[in-house]
Image (cartoon, coloured by chain):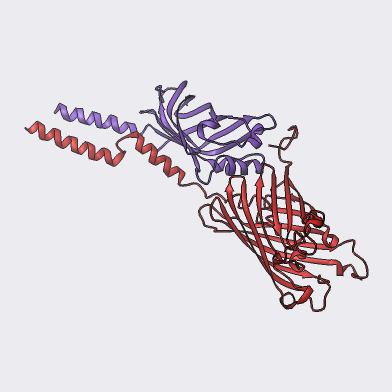
Chain colours: A red, B purple
Amino acid sequence: MKKLILFASAALVSTALRAQTTPATGKTSADSLLSSMEGTEKAEPVIATFKSTRLILGATTETVKKKNLNFLVIHRFGDIGGSQGGGKTLFGLDNSSDIYIGFEYGLTDNLDIDFGRSKFNQQVDLGLKYAILHQTSDNSMPFAVTLLGKAGVKAYNDNAAFPTFEDRLAYVAQAIIARKFSSKFSLQVTPTFVRNNSPFPFLNGNENNFFAMGVAGRLKVTKRMGIVVDYAHPFSKFRDNATGDNRFYDPLGVGIEIETGGHVFTVIFSNAKAITESSYLSATQSDWGKGQFRLGFTISRMFSFNGKKKEASNKY
Amino acid sequence: MKYIVFILLTWLSLNQVGQDLYACKNAKISLFSSAPLEDIQASTNTGTSVYNAATGDLAFSVNIRSFKFPKSLMQEHFNENYMDSDKYPRATFKGKVNEKADVSKNGTYPVTATGDLTVHGVTQTRTIPGTITVNNGTLSMTSEFMVKCVDHKIDIPTLVFKHIAETIKMNVSATYTPAK
């Protein structure tokens, strides 16, 4: 009996002691050690809030990464309906409201320099885009903020309309604030300031400066395809009060975005004729209700100069 | 009395198990794949691993997002289009080393580990070859193995099929320190 008690108490003490020093089996201790090590990792920044640096009308929070070059071709056809549309122009395909050819080059991962030229107003734009804040996976930073500054010059327009060089200039400053709510849904708001030295259209009372607010979003349908919507409202008394033939409408674009690895295609419908921010915010006088919307597309092609020089191509 | 001695001995020997636990926080894990148009390679040195030298239990875990590619667009596509790293942030291996490696003696031991490899949320039972090297109390492990995209339901769209290989070569190397 004495022996049995000794045995039992010793067994109890030994298990109790063992529980204090090391867990009973190696497996669980290994697992808990592994998970404790994983817990010390830093939160990662959220990537790919948008697939491209452009959505439809405006820019997104995405910047071109270091030593990458983004080549953009953006096209807007003519009015599908209304007096300019219909069968006689093949629903606007005969006309082009605007054609934009642009380059964006990544100076660092967060800063890129943009250059582009539009048919609309024959405007040449130069801009800088800086990603100032990144959304993080642990929500310690719940959204991304990118600043965009652009200066445009109407390079080849007539001298009667622009007596001095300064008259040809227009500026845009934007703070783009975006959040990727899930892997499928991203939304951004874009408070914008527009400065036109000779406000377009050339009408009495048009403001040199005004604010605008943009709202844009993407909903991914498949991994490579998404529905995109882009809308902007200029806060301008002149635009609100204009009547008759000079009425203004808020630019709105809807479309689909297809990504093919390197290329991003966007096929859209929009009432905005112009592509450059200073132009589409100032001069959208087409109305969806009158059929004055158009087919448009954006082709964005990313070239990387980071890889080894011997690599035959950047495609994949 | 001899029961007590027996129990104490058992307890001591079991206690010894805990001291055979080795951990690694900076395992280097790299992937490489040769495709017709372009080689795909990426690496990370933030893999974590735990090895129990007494029981042979071995576990690896790596954050998919930590893989760095030379091309940022490739890295984005890897996470967004192939690995769904939002949904499946980690790849893990949990298993047992089949051979005993004597951690008290310097040497190189070719081993195999059998267990569950989980990538992209799909678990496969694999036996993976590797090497354990013991050098004056430090333990290191290396392994090279292939992962088939199709085994882990990693879809390669036909549009870019030719650009991405169907099999990815993985290299793992970890140096362990005794865990407290």
**Residue B99 found in image quarter:** top left
The outermost residue toward the front is: A87
Indicate whether B146 appears above or below A273. Answer: above
Q: Please provide percent x and percent y for residue A273.
A: 77, 61
> The C terminus of chain A lies in which quarter of the figure?
top right
- Left or right relative to B122: residue A259: right
Residue at image coords 52%, 49%: A42
Q: Please provide percent x and percent y for residue A103.
A: 78, 51
Q: Please provide percent x and percent y for residue A303.
A: 73, 43
> The N terminus of chain A lies in which quarter of the figure?
top left
Q: Please provide percent x and percent y for residue B130.
A: 49, 24
- Left or right relative to A231: residue B90: left
Given residues A279 and A89, the one toward you in this image is A89
Residue at image coords 55%, 30%: B170
Indicate whether B100 appears above or below A219. Answer: above
Residue at image coords 68%, 32%: B38
- Left or right relative to A30: residue B10: left
